[in-house]
Amino acid sequence: MLDDDGYVSTVARIDGAQVTADLAKWLESQGLPPRVGAAVTSLCPQLDSAADRAVSKVAGRFVSGRGPRTGYGPQAGDG
């Protein structure tokens, strides 16, 4: 049995707090009001959740061999 969750946790993790903080800071440096930065920062939980779901889905396909033929990992039909 494959440990997709273990694979995902060691291979890819997005720091939503850092991403949203960096984006908010950049937006403010472009002249947008601080309330826009605050709104972006409040999206951190949604960004974390969406990123985790996407990474889990892709990693699950990769680990199980159902992903696109990339030349990496086992592929469906390989024998």
Image (tube, grey):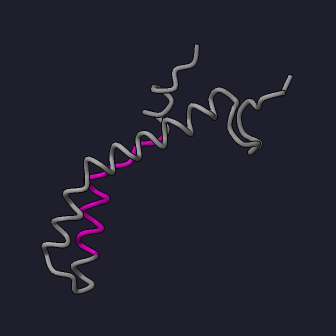
Outermost residue, right direction?
Answer: 79
Front residue (pair 49, 20): 49
Compared across the picture, whether 76 is left or right of 20 comes to right
Q: Quadrant of residue 29?
A: bottom left
Q: Quadrant of residue 23?
A: bottom left
Q: Residue at x 53, y 37 (%)?
A: 57
Compared across the picture, whether 40 is left or right of 72 comes to left
Outermost residue, top direction?
Answer: 1
Q: Which residues are magenta?
A: 12-26
Q: Position of residue 33 (x, y in %)?
A: 15, 80
Quarter holding the C terminus is: top right
25 over 47 or under it: above or below: below
Q: Position of residue 68 (x, y in %)?
A: 72, 42
Secondary structure mostly seen in the magenta stretch:
helix
Q: Residue at x 48, y 34 (%)?
A: 8
Report if residue 61 lies within the magenta region.
no
Compared across the picture, whether 48 is left or right of 38 comes to right
Outermost residue, bottom direction?
Answer: 31
Q: Residue at x 68, y 38 (%)?
A: 67
How many marks can you see?
0
Report if residue 15 lies within the magenta region.
yes
Compared across the picture, whether 78 is left or right of 70 comes to right
Quarter holding the N terminus is: top right
1 over 79 or under it: above or below: above
Q: Position of residue 72 (x, y in %)?
A: 72, 39
1 over 31 or under it: above or below: above
